[in-house]
Amino acid sequence: MAPKSRQSFQLSALPVAMFAHLVAIAVMALLLVWLLHFRDGAPIVNGDWVYLNSRGSYNGIQDCTSNKKVFKFHNELGIPDMYTLHSWLGLSTICLFGLQLLFAFFAFLFPGAEWSTRARLAPWHVFFGIVIFFMAILSAETGLVEKFIFLKLQRGQEALIVNFTGLLILLFGISVGLTVLLPQRY
Ligand code: HEM
């Protein structure tokens, strides 16, 4: 069997990274169409990606700051917190992301570990970076599924938009995963 080599992909990371960017733009475009056209509201409230429609019901495209709003919203309506797989995945993703950031800051920036220690830590930093990235993809996918069910969507334009958003998020994850595997230059 031929030895494993990244060169054997015969492709460099650059075109795949460009493709990943295009997919990310397409995801954002679909989200805008969904939120503005189908959910009659502005997607950017107080500068973050959260959408609270005129009836006050929660429709979230999450980022860390808007999670606080979900908890607040759940409390106001007496809905229990953290009971879904989506919420467990989402919170673990945020926590691990914070830990990764903190750890890397101390190890690589300030005060910074010995060079030999940094070299040993780097592959683990990359590995956990990939894990956290795919956890974020999973959180977004499960979030979309939940929203789909809560809205009782079946067939129709809005259902198509939500499902295509999910497929594109998956394609984004796959292409970013591939860029990590591919050599920088071929
Ligand atoms: C990386 C992205 C995401 C993260 C980190 C995340 C995180 C979370 C967390 C921690 C909760 C629990 C709040 C609580 O229990 O009070 C939650 C709830 C919720 N999220 Fe997300 N979320 C993400 C993406 C999405 C997306 C894309 C949607 C749908 C468009 C969505 C829809 C919901 C809904 C409907 C709830 C309330 C029901 C529940 O607790 O599961 N989320 N999210």
Image (cartoon, rainbow, N blue to C red):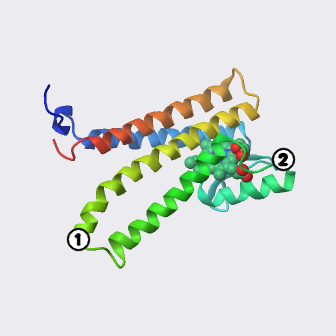
* 19 or 32: nearer the viewer: 19
Q: Where is residue 103 drawn, in percent x and y?
A: 42, 67
Q: Are marks 1 and 2 in contact (CB under 8 Å)?
A: no
Q: Where is residue 27 drawn, in percent x and y?
A: 52, 39
Determine whether, in the image, residue 81 is placed left or right of residue 143: right
Please tell me which residue is depicted at 38% across the width and 42% down the height of the picture.
Answer: 176
Can the viewer see residue 61?
A: no
* 108 or 148: nearer the viewer: 108
Q: Where is residue 55 drawn, in percent x and y?
A: 84, 47
Where, by quadrant of the figure, is residue 156 drawn?
Answer: top right
Determine whether, in the image, residue 119 is placed left or right of residue 174: left
Q: Which residue is mark 1?
A: 115
Quadrant holding the C terminus: top left
Q: Where is residue 46 drawn, in percent x and y?
A: 67, 62
Alpha carbon separation for disc pair 1 and 2: 55 Å
* Residue furthest to the bottom: 111
Q: Of the residues shown, which amino acid type is indicated by label 1?
A: Trp
Can the viewer see residue 22?
A: yes
User: Which mark identifies residue 9?
Assistant: none
- How packed mark 2 is, by other alpha carbons closer than 10 Å (few <14, some 14-19, many 20 or more), is few
Q: Which residue is mark 2?
A: 55
Mark 1, ligand 1, within 8 Å: the answer is no
Q: Of the residues shown, which amino acid type is indicated by label 2?
A: Arg
Between discs 1 and 2, the one toward the N terminus: 2
Kind of element beneath mark 2: loop
- How packed mark 1 is, by other alpha carbons closer than 10 Å (few <14, some 14-19, many 20 or more), is few
